[in-house]
Amino acid sequence: MKARITITLKPGVLDPQGKAIEGALHALGFGGVEGVRQGKFIEVEVAESDPARAREEIERMCKQLLANTIIENYAYELEAA
Amino acid sequence: MKASVIVFPGSNCDRDAAVALQGAMTAMGDKGAAPTMVWHGDSELPDSDLILLPGGFSYGDYLRSGAMAAHSPIMREVVRRAKAGTPVLGICNGFQVLTEAGLLPGVLMRNATLRFICKDVLLRVERDDTPFTSHYKQDQVVRFPIAHKDGCYFADAGTLYLLENENRIAFRYCEADGAVTEAANPNGSSGNIAGIFNETGTVLGMMPHPERLIDPALSGTDGIHMFSSLVEALH
């Protein structure tokens, strides 16, 4: 199965990169833009074909390595590869 | 004293750290002693009175600084020894690895300026009653180099309260008179924190580089006292 994992900074965690992107968008004339936050997108293919077990595996990957849960949230979608 | 310096792919301060340690060992009369360099892929760690995680860019800082290194084979043993009380010093990338490995709380985020900063900074020594800092004086102002892009220390309010309350802050960025000001904070760290201890005071993580100022030829020796403190406490 394929997992599409999105990792985002928790609300309230300072995101200077998001702020810099927001500033650049303003400079390009996108004046109405606000609240820009930068995150990560990771695709993972797992051999596990049972969705419940695949979810459990992805959860552990996210908690152990892919996200730092002190500052980041994660979410994912699963689809048949 | 037996010391191990862990070498990750991308470490670049491992040799400087070993030279600093060896210099302190020699100065304290431990002639012929030298730290053992231990490759990250090893799973066995020699007998060590001190484990040092050096600065650098382990695994190219992929994913998050220190995240990959924290799961290197050798780190299982480092975590086990640290929890059993072996002193561990993490400098710069080593500090990032310690937080990612869960041996120290919080996280090192991108500098508030978004820039890589390489310069000398002033630090206030917050504690002189630890094996790492006994050759400094509390509230002494020292000059250490920093060289990092991900050095902005962040932790939730509860963790910061705990660190303050349990006297676990090792160094803070400060002015020449020791005042802790926003202007003296190079990277946006919470509470101007440059280094912290674990609950037992046996694990120290810090962004500045004491091993880079150990010789007058390098324009200063403020860093040498950390290594002499350690050698005296642990030999």
Image: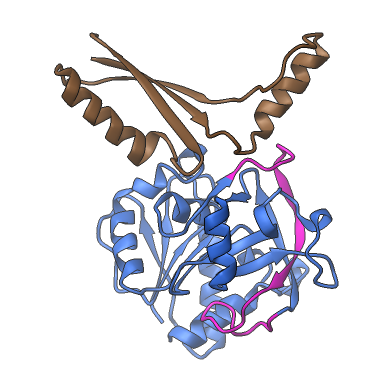
Chain colours: A brown, B blue
Residue at the location (53% across, 26% down)? A39
| Res. B31 in view | no
The answer to whether B128 appears left or right of B82 in the picture is right
- Image coords of residue B144 (percent x, y): 71, 65
The answer to whether B91 appears left or right of B177 in the picture is left
Residue at the location (72% across, 21% down)? A22
Would you place residue A45 above or below residue A30 in this image? Answer: below
- Image coords of residue B158 (percent x, y): 53, 56
Residue at the location (76% across, 59% down)? B120
Near-viewer residue (B217 or A5) = A5
| Res. A22 in view | yes
Would you place residue B31 above or below residue B104 in this image? Answer: below
Would you place residue B140 above or below residue B162 in this image? Answer: below
Number of residue marks: 0
> Start and end of the magenta stretch?
B109-138
Would you place residue B30 above or below residue A78 in this image? Answer: below
The answer to whether B193 appears left or right of B219 in the picture is left
- In the picture, the quarter occupied by the C terminus of chain B is bottom left
